[in-house]
Image (cartoon, rainbow, N blue to C red):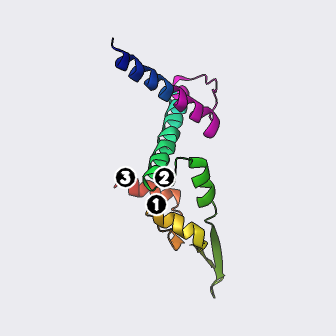
């Protein structure tokens, strides 16, 4: 094995170690002693999906020229808020509208660099019955 091959394999090892460090520290996923195989597999899947989302956000941030700190990016985007406006009707029912706040100027610039535009409103949650009937179609 050549020196360059050894170096590549060693760097791959550090990537793997970094992924476990991210899962344990940044994502706060710790070993959980499940009793059933299906739960172990579900835990591994959730850890993998969390890590995949983390790395996707990191690459996305790097491509936008914002660095690689996912925690910082999420801390900034966390300032975007949503609120429910509840309006009474003449029939005694209420209408609930979920609205997204207008971001501050600095957050607007950040979202623009990421190629994102927050929605003005959020879609109302689907009832479990509607979601199930749509899934069957």
User: In terms of depth relative to the viewer, which is nearer, 84 or 133?
Assistant: 84
Residue position marked by numbered label 3 in the rendering: 136
| Residue at horizontal 64 percent and vertical 27 percent from the top | 32
Quadrant where the N terminus is found in the figure: top left
Please give the range of residues in magenta.
17-40
Task: Give the mark nearer the N terminus: 1 vs 3.
Answer: 1
Alpha-carbon span between mark 1 and mark 3: 36 Å
- Say whether residue 16 is left or right of residue 22: left
- The residue most toward the top is 1
Residue position marked by numbered label 1 in the rendering: 114
Q: Secondary structure at mark 3?
A: helix
x, y (%) of residue 78?
Answer: 62, 59
Task: Give the mark nearer the N terminus: 2 vs 3.
Answer: 2
User: In terms of depth relative to the viewer, which is nearer, 21 or 9?
Assistant: 9
Q: Is residue 48 above or below residue 13?
A: below
Q: Secondary structure at mark 1?
A: helix
Residue position marked by numbered label 2 in the rendering: 61
**Mark 2 closeness class: few <14, some 14–19, many ≥20 residues within 10 Å:** some
- Marks 1 and 3 in Cβ contact (< 8 Å): no
Which quadrant holds residue 83? bottom right
Task: Give the mark nearer the N terminus: 1 vs 2.
Answer: 2
């Amino acid at each position: 094995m050549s020196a360059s091959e050894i170096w590549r394999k060693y760097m791959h090892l550090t990537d793997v170690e970094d992924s476990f460090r991210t899962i344990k520290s940044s994502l706060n996923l710790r070993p959980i002693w499940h009793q059933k195989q299906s739960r172990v597999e579900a835990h591994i899947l959730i850890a993998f999906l969390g890590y995949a989302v983390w790395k996707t956000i990191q690459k996305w941030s790097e491509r936008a020229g914002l660095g690689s700190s996912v925690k910082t990016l999420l801390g900034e985007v966390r300032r975007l808020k949503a609120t429910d406006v509840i309006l009474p009707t003449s029939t005694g029912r209420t209408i609930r509208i979920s609205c997204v706040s207008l971001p501050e100027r600095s957050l607007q610039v950040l979202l623009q660099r990421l190629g994102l535009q927050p929605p003005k409103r959020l879609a109302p949650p689907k009832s479990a019955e509607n979601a199930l009937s749509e899934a069957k179609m």
